[in-house]
Amino acid sequence: MNTNLESIIPLLNKNLKIVQRSDYFNFSIDSLLISEFIKIQKIPKKF
């Protein structure tokens, strides 16, 4: 990849990073902040 098209974003003081290209869709900080607050519970389907 062309490094001029990439940006590296650290994620909320964790050991994770997002590498984004400027010529494609990019995540916003809103998506990342919301992901910190949700809890997904698996509920079994009833037939």
Image (cartoon, grey):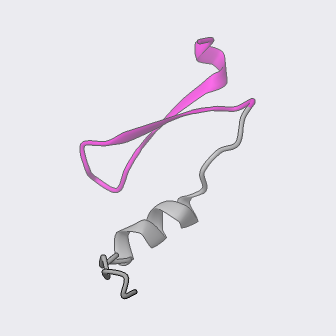
- Which residue of the protein is positioned furthest toward the right in this rendering? 23
Which residue reaches farthest bottom?
46
Q: Residue furthest front?
A: 47
In the rendered image of this protein, does residue 3 appear above or below residue 11?
above
**Residue in the image at 31% along x and 80% along y:** 44
Q: Residue 31 in the image: x percent, y percent?
A: 54, 63
Identify the image quadrant of residue 45: bottom left
In percent of width and height, residue 6 lies at 59, 25
Split into 4 quadrants, where in the image is the N terminus? top right
9 lies left or right of 25: left
Would residue 9 be counted in the magenta stretch?
yes
Q: Quadrant of the C terminus?
A: bottom left
Give me the residue at 72% from left, 35% from top: 24
Q: Is residue 15 magenta?
A: yes
Query: Start and end of the magenta stretch?
Result: 1-23
Q: Count of labels shown?
A: 0
| Residue 19 image point, x, y percent | 50, 33
Residue at x 38%, y 77% (from the top left corner):
38
Q: Position of residue 12 (x, y in %)?
A: 34, 56
Q: Quadrant of residue 40?
A: bottom left
Q: Residue at x 58, y 15 (%)?
A: 3
Q: Between residues 30 and 35, which one lies in front from this camera angle?
A: 35
The correct choice, above or below, for 42 with respect to 25 in the image is: below
Instruction: Name, please, the residue furthest toward the top.
Output: 2
Q: Is residue 34 left or right of residue 45?
A: right
